[in-house]
Amino acid sequence: MSTESPCIAVCMIDPRTGLCFGCGRTLPEIARWHRMDGAERRAVMALLPARMADAGMVQLGSAGGSKAG
C-alpha cells in the first residue's frame, strides 16, 4: 500500500475553511488517509490545488510526492 501524501508538515487547520494550511485536506481526510486506497488518495490530491485556490489559500509546497501522512 502506498503512503503517498500531500502532507508538507505544516499541520494547522484554518478555522474559517476547515482545511489544513499545508496540504488543503480536511480533518476527516487526514484522519482516514492511511485507510484510503491509492485511487481514493489520488482523487483527493487532484482536488487540493483548486480547493485551496477557491478558499484563497496559498499552497506552501508541492502537493504530492512526500511520504508523510
Image: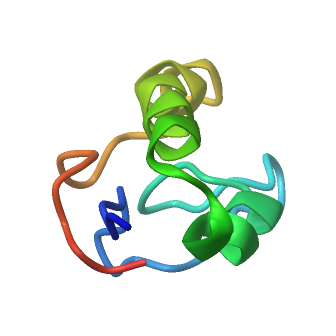
| Residue 13 visible, this orientation | no
Residue at 32 percent across and 64 percent down: it is: 2
Residue 48 horizontal side relative to residue 30, left or right: left
Residue at 44 percent across and 37 percent down: it is: 45
**In the rendered image, which quarter is residue 44 located in?**
top right
Quadrant the C terminus occupies = bottom left
Where residue 23 appears, as percent x and y from the top left, is: 44, 56
Where residue 37 appears, as percent x and y from the top left, is: 55, 52
Residue at 20 percent across and 53 percent down: it is: 61
| Residue 40 visible, this orientation | yes
Residue 52 horizontal side relative to residue 61, left or right: right
Eyeballing the image, is 35 above or below 24? below
Q: Residue 9 versus residue 31: which sits nearer the camera?
A: 31
Where residue 27 appears, as percent x and y from the top left, is: 77, 67
Q: Residue 7 versus residue 1: which sits nearer the camera?
A: 1
**In the rendered image, which quarter is residue 8 located in?**
bottom left
Residue 13 horizontal side relative to residue 58, left or right: right
Q: Report how many numbered discs are placed on residues in the image.
A: 0
Residue at 38 percent across and 67 percent down: it is: 1
Q: How is the image coloured?
A: rainbow
